[in-house]
């Protein structure tokens, strides 16, 4: 409902701020073939993701109400929806200890010769939370290096190893990415080519993403060409780049960030009145 009200408000403001002239106003309806090449999650919080996201393509549509302000410049209010299929490929985590996850003290111990005290104990604990597995090794005891001048390394219930990993599906529990946008666009039309009119444009607005029900600032860049079929009807084919911002997905105390940039080929029809 909020999205419909926002679109209605944009159209109302647009119509109330510009004086209409004959056939300077238009309505455009376009279909899209969409590819979200940048939908690749990343994390810097010590979480290891196993798997990947593939088949990041889909379809969409847009509808816009526009007004020609000058000979070569026009503006429009636009609503668009893009549906991109998400195919999540999980893989089993690598078995064994990941040495990069060892504490600095443990790494120092591995690089030296020596012996442990007789009362040394270790404990390994594995927890699973919202699809994320955390493996922890706790150590108590004393390591006595053989090199002269080195101090004993004392471990008292100290975490010497901690590794967290998750399958990709733990963060992507949707089968598709849906991005809806409400945009204000401006275009420059090149003239002098008879019935063909090349154009380029840019727009800003709001993007609504279904992964975490998140809304972001969005911008897009457009380029293409239109062909006049009659005085009132024209067709267009073009390219659109959309950046609807980043989405933070929270699971099990960890956060994964993914972009929602997309590329699309657009094919549409425009009616001028």
Image (cartoon, rainbow, N blue to C red):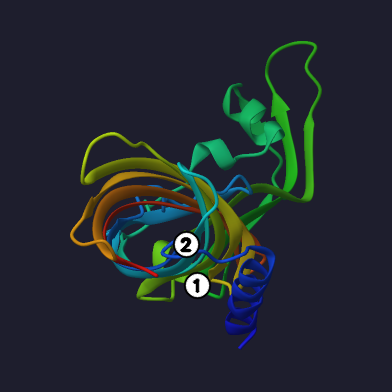
Q: Nearer the viewer, residue 99 or 183?
A: 183
State whether residue 107 is above or below residue 37.
above
Q: Nearer the viewer, residue 142 or 19?
A: 19
Which residue lies at the image location 29% right of the left edge and 43% below the top edge? 197
Q: Nearer the viewer, residue 180 or 158?
A: 180
Residue 68 is situated, as x and y percent measured from the top left of the image, at 49, 54
State whether residue 170 is above or below residue 121.
below
Q: Residue furthest top?
A: 148
Q: Is residue 32 left or right of residue 82?
A: left
Residue 188 is situated, as x and y percent measured from the top left of the image, at 45, 41
Q: Residue furthest front?
A: 22
When asked about the image quadrant of residue 118, the answer is top right
Q: Nearer the viewer, residue 210 or 79?
A: 79
Q: Earlier in the sequence, mark 2 or mark 1?
A: 1
Discs 2, 1 touching: Cβ within 8 Å: yes
Residue 143 seen: yes
- Secondary structure category for the residue under label 2: strand
Q: Is residue 16 left or right of residue 20?
A: right
Q: Residues within 10 Å of mark 1 (few under 14, many from 20)?
A: some
Task: Tell me the residue that label 1 is attached to.
Answer: 131
Q: Residue furthest bottom?
A: 1
- Secondary structure category for the residue under label 1: loop
C-alpha distance separating marks 2 and 1: 6 Å
Residue 261 is situated, as x and y percent measured from the top left of the image, at 45, 51
* Disc ID at residue 166: 2
Q: Residues within 10 Å of mark 2 (few under 14, many from 20)?
A: many
Residue 162 is situated, as x and y percent measured from the top left of the image, at 61, 51
């Amino acid at each position: 409902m909020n999205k419909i009200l926002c679109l209605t408000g944009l159209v109302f403001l647009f119509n109330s701020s510009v004086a209409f002239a004959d056939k300077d106003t238009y309505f455009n309806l376009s279909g899209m073939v969409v590819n979200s090449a940048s939908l690749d999650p990343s994390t810097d919080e010590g979480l290891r993701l196993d798997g990947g996201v593939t088949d990041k393509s889909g379809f969409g549509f847009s509808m816009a109400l526009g007004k020609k302000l000058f000979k070569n410049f026009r503006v429009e209010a636009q609503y668009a929806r893009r549906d991109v299929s998400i195919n999540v490929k999980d893989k089993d985590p690598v078995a064994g200890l990941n040495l990069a996850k060892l504490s600095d003290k443990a790494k120092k111990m591995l690089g030296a010769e020596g012996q442990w005290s007789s009362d040394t104990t270790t404990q390994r604990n594995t927890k699973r939370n919202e699809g994320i597995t955390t493996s922890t090794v706790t150590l108590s005891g004393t390591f006595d290096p053989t090199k002269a001048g080195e101090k004993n390394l004392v471990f008292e219930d100290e975490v010497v190893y901690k590794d967290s990993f998750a399958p990709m599906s733990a963060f992507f529990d949707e089968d598709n990415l849906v991005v809806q946008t409400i945009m204000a666009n401006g275009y420059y039309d090149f003239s002098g080519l008879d019935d063909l009119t090349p154009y380029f444009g840019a727009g800003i607005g709001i993007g609504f993403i279904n992964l975490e029900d998140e809304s972001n600032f969005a911008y897009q860049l457009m380029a293409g060409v239109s062909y006049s079929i009659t005085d009132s009807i024209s067709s267009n084919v073009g390219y659109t780049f959309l950046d609807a911002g980043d989405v933070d997905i929270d699971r099990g105390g960890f956060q994964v960030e993914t972009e929602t940039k997309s590329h699309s080929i657009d094919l549409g029809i425009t009616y001028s009145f």
